[in-house]
Every structure is written in C-alpha cells, then in structure tokens.
Image (cartoon, coloured by chain):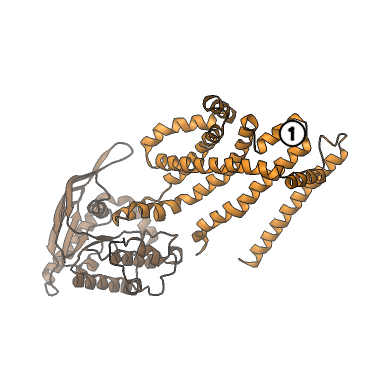
Chain colours: A orange, B brown
Amino acid sequence: MGRAEAGALSIAARDRLLSLLGFIAIWWLGSYLSANPNLLPGPQRVALFAWHEIVTGALPAAFAATLARVIVAFILAMLGGGALGYITGRSARANAWVDPWVVIGLNLPVLVVIVLAYIWIGLNDAAAVLAVVLAKAPTVVVTVREGARALDPGLAEMAQAFHLPQWRRLRHVVLPQLLPYIAAAGRSGLSITWKIVLLVELLGRPSGVGYVLNLFFQNFNVTGILAYGLAFAGLMLLFEAAVLQPLERRATAWRSNA
Amino acid sequence: MLSVRIDRKAYTSDSGVERTILSDVHFSVAPGEVVGLLGPSGAGKSTMLRILLGLDTAYEGHVRHDFRRVGVVFQEPRLLPWLTVEENIRLVVTDDMRQPDIGFLLETVQLGHAAALRPRQLSLGMARRVALARALAISPELLVLDEPFASLDARLGAGLAESVARWARSTGAAVIIATHDLAQAMERVSRLLILSGVPARLSADRPVPAAGDTALYAKLLAEFAFLRADKRGTEEVQQLPSEQTSG
C-alpha cells in the first residue's frame, strides 16, 4: 500500500469517526432541547440503561435468542437461495419455472409472509425461521443467479475437456467465480435478515430483541427501545466488519495479488 | 486410435439462419502420429477440435477414440486466476493419475521460476506455456493443441514445438496441432490435414514431404497460398480495411 493511499484511508477513517461523533452530538442536543426527556433520552442515559441490562443478564439473553434465529435463518436462506440461484442461472428452463415464484417472493410484503407462516404453522420457532427464510431467499436467488450467468464458459470447457471430477470443478472452478456474488448476497442478507427476525419476534415470539422491543413499546420506554435497537445494530455491524468483510477480502485476494 | 467422422456441423444464427460450418470431415489419427490441422483463420479448425474433445455434440456424425487421457491447449490459456501456476497444473491431475514432476514440466516450457506466480503476473506467452505444461501434466495419450505457438516469439515457438515433438516421439502419444501457419506445421508434423472451403471440408490429407522433396513442398505452399487468398476473397473482405490500417 502506498503512502498516499494509506493517508487517504486514514482521512476516510477520521471522517467516519467525526460523522459518528456528529450523530451523537445532534442526538444529545435534541435530547437537551426536548421538553420531554422520556421522548428522546440522551446518549448517556441510553448507554447506562444498556449497561444495566447487560449486568442483569436481560440483554444477553434477548440477544442470544435473536442471534440463534438470525444464524439459522441466514444459513438456510443462503444455502437454499444460493443453490436455486445457481440452478436458475445455468438453466433457462429452470429459471422459467422458478422466476415467477422469485418475483412474487420479492414483492410480497414481509409482514404477509410472517402472518401467514404463524397462522399456517403455528406460533413457534419453525414458523418464525421459515418466514425469515422465505422473505430473504429471493434476493439471494437473484444475486447468485447473476453470478451463475457470468461464469466463464471457457473455464467450464477446460474443466470438461480435462474430465475434472464434479467436486473439483465446483470447488476450484465454479465457487471462486461465484464468491463475490455470494459475499454480496451475504452482506446485504445479514442486515435484512436480522431486521426481519426482530419483526417476527415482535409479532409472535416470547423471547428475543423483537419481543423485548414490543414490551418497551407498550410501556412507552424509549430508552429501552434505543438501547436494545442500537446495541443490536452495533453487534451486527461488528459481525460484518470482523467476520464477513475479512472473509470476502480473503476470497477475492487473488484479484489484487498481481 | 482416434476416428473422426463429421458429416455436417451447422450453426443457427440469432436471426434463425442456419449456416453449415463443416461438411464431410473424415479422418483418423493413430498413436504416435503428429498431425497438423491446417486452414485459414475462421475455417472451422477450433470448431472441429471442440467436437473431437467432446465439448460440442450438436453435429451429424461421430467421434470415437480409445485414448484414456486427452490433454488440450486452447487458443486462450484458460488458467484459473485464483490459483498459482503450480496449482493450475496440479488441478487437472486426478488421484488415479501419476503425480507429475512440476519442476520438470515447467523447465520443459522454459518457466522454471514461475511455479508460485499467479496468471495475472504472466504475459500471454507465458500463460500459454503454462497451459501446455498443464496439458502435459496428465501424460496424455492424445494431445490437442489449438494454435499453441501463436503470440510467442519465433525462436521460443520453435523451441517449444521441438519440445512437444520430442515428447511425442518419446511417449508415443498422438498429437493434433491446429494452425494457420503452414511453415510452422511443415517443420513439426508428420501428416497434414487441410481444411478449406465454405463450408469447410477436408481438402487434403497427406504426409509432409521429405526435406528433399522440394517439388511437393512447393506444390503444398502454392496450394495453401491459394486457399488463403480464396478464403480472403470470399469471406474476409470486410476485414481488409482494418488490416491495412494496423499494418
């Protein structure tokens, strides 16, 4: 990395930090000027409440329940959507069959999917996870389908001419080409998934961040809503920065190794 | 033994017009033969190679062979950019094959230092040589080369062609080299197949003349020059202006 590039990066990091501090300052100012501090509690009050919830164990318990649902739904949506995206990207016939379903899935309001899943399957975790998967998978299908359509036919022919075993073709020829698309679907997928999971919990689960937010809403506890909402968003951002982005960088490192 | 019988190969364009590319191409290649497949650019050589490699099955006729391992060098190197040179070569060697000596293979194509490099770090000529090393890595009984020495300088091309010829002699493998360069083909092969016409047919299948047979050599040269001129006259008129500007 050149010095100019490193300098540009540190300037960008500084700007990001300043922007974040600006957000907190505006929040603090809004709360200071507010006639009713319960309507917009300041950052320090929210942070104190969050700390209290962490110490009592309420926040970790809610986070654990939500995270479990996010992880299961995310993995199922990525696997199912990814496989379907690959098949529809490679076969026009399969795409003709699946595409109308994907279009319906993309345009059906998430709320409708969740409510129907609860009505048809019952108020349980299976229905909750299924609703999230059905709401998320269509976007994975669309993204991975684009990747499958962009696969280099020359490399596929090379693999066929040398009679490479199927597993070796998939692992060394197909997957590396699909990885940027899978990573893009994963990153956008995670943020959508956890937001849908909160909605699912709010509507019909007795645990998790969504359930707790519903309680705070009924008690008009804005401090609690902000504490749980911002803390969970922070956790997801941290996961993306610490896990997903490095994975993506590693998968595409060959592009910049020249 | 490879037996090729392509009665007809046609393409249908987007506008629905069917055009026959190859017609009545029948020949066979025995182990140990080094065959040059000669024809002007666009004559259908690559299409024919794709058919005999099993990559194109939409044709009338059949291709049969009893070679257990078939190595190929395409016109483009077709290396996997996320793998190193060594990994690219090892990729095509399956568990039931003898593991190749990568260092020796790379020395053969004069790239002894390149094992750890990635394809982005190679010139086109180097990448083509890696593709040749990859094809040799499986100890093929049939080696198919599509314009293998284009984009290499003349001396390097000649050296590699000699390496391939020596390798073929020592292993008894059959080799098919597609090229549009008559002189290059004559130097390295024992038999010439010439594709020409529209649609392309096999217009000649003859042994390469012995070094002293200047009459046959001259006849072949004249014939091929005529084929190239004919091809250009009928099909490549539109390419002439760009050739003139680039030349």
Q: Chain of mark 1?
A: A
Q: Is residue B113 above or below residue A161?
A: below
**Front position in the image: B3 or B103:** B103
* Labels in figure, total: 1
The residue shown at (57%, 56%) is: A246
Does any portion of residue B182 appear in the rendered image?
yes
**Front position in the image: B38 or B234:** B38
x, y percent for residue A82: 46, 43
Q: Does residue A243 appear left or right of residue A46 in this picture?
A: left
Q: Is residue A112 above or below residue A147?
A: above
Q: Farthest top residue?
A: A119
The residue shown at (50%, 29%) is: A104
Q: Quadrant of the N terminus of chain A?
A: bottom right
Residue B175 quadrant: bottom left
Label 1, residues with CA under 10 Å away: few <14, some 14-19, many ≥20: some
Residue B97 quadrant: bottom left
Q: Does residue A132 appear left or right of residue A90 in this picture?
A: right
The residue shown at (46%, 40%) is: A80
x, y percent for residue B135: 30, 63
Q: Is residue A201 above or below residue B153?
A: above
Q: Does residue A151 appear left or right of residue B99 in this picture?
A: right
Does any portion of residue B179 appear in the rendered image?
no
Q: Which residue is mark 1?
A: A216
x, y percent for residue B170: 20, 73
**Three-letter code, disc 1:** Phe
Disc 1 secondary structure class = helix
x, y percent for residue B123: 42, 66
